Amino acid sequence: MLDSRATDDGTAIRRRRACNACSKRFTTYERIEGDEQIRVVKRDGRIQSFDRRKVLQGMLTACEKRPVPGDVLEASANRIQQTILAEGEREVTTRRVGELVMEELRKLDQVAYVRFASVYRQFKDIDEFIAEVGRVIRKDQP
């Protein structure tokens, strides 16, 4: 192991390691699984456990081929989870999770935000897509 330390937000241990066979370096994150189980209420009424990895995967997909570092996305996923926990509810809707993801992506990368929003909001046609791009442009103008 090369290095081990807490992440900036204190929610995980970041470990830098090197493979003895090939000498490549990699990073792992270890998180404590607490009793704080968040349940996500899906649109169809089903309930699932909150999965931070699914949130992160959605963000990674939206940021594919975009200049957003993985550690920045990790921090965003942590903020989303911490926000949900801080709200004190044990059940959260997929809508709330999606809104939090879009808030984070809007700050990080406009293209990734629009990609995520187009899938999350299920745009029906190009007009809805253009309207959303227009909203992004207007919000970023001084």
Image (cartoon, rainbow, N blue to C red):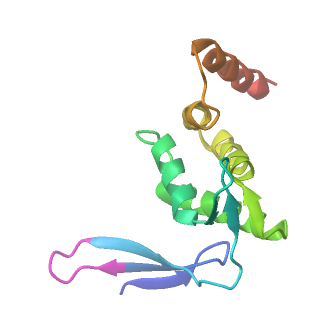
Write down the quadrant of residue 132 in the picture. Answer: top right
Q: Compared with residue 37, is residue 115 higher up or lower down, i.e. above or below?
A: above
User: Percent position (x, y) of residue 85?
Assistant: 77, 70
Which residue is farthest left?
Answer: 21
Residue 20 part of the magenta-drawn span: yes
Give the camera-side residue of 34 and 135.
34
Which quadrant is the C terminus positioned in? top right
User: Percent position (x, y) of residue 112?
Assistant: 55, 37
Residue depicted at x 57% and y 56%: 55
User: Percent position (x, y) of residue 7?
Assistant: 59, 75
Residue 19 part of the magenta-drawn span: yes
Write down the quadrant of residue 115 in the picture. Answer: top right
Which residue is farthest front?
Answer: 45
Side of 43 relative to 5 (left or right): right
Give the camera-side residue of 54 and 31.
54
Residue depicted at x 40% and y 78%: 16
Q: Compared with residue 81, is residue 122 higher up or lower down, i.e. above or below?
A: above
Side of 102 relative to 118 (left or right): right
Give the camera-side residue of 96 and 113.
96
Residue depicted at x 37% and y 84%: 2
Which quadrant is the N terminus positioned in? bottom left
Magenta highlight range: 17-24
Please identify the dominant SS of the magenta region.
Answer: loop
Question: Can the viewer see residue 141 in this picture?
Answer: yes
Residue depicted at x 84% and y 70%: 88
Which residue is farthest right?
Answer: 88
Which residue is farthest top?
Answer: 127
User: Percent position (x, y) of residue 33?
Assistant: 59, 83
Side of 15 relative to 41 (left or right): left
Q: Compared with residue 49, is residue 70 higher up or lower down, i.e. above or below?
A: above
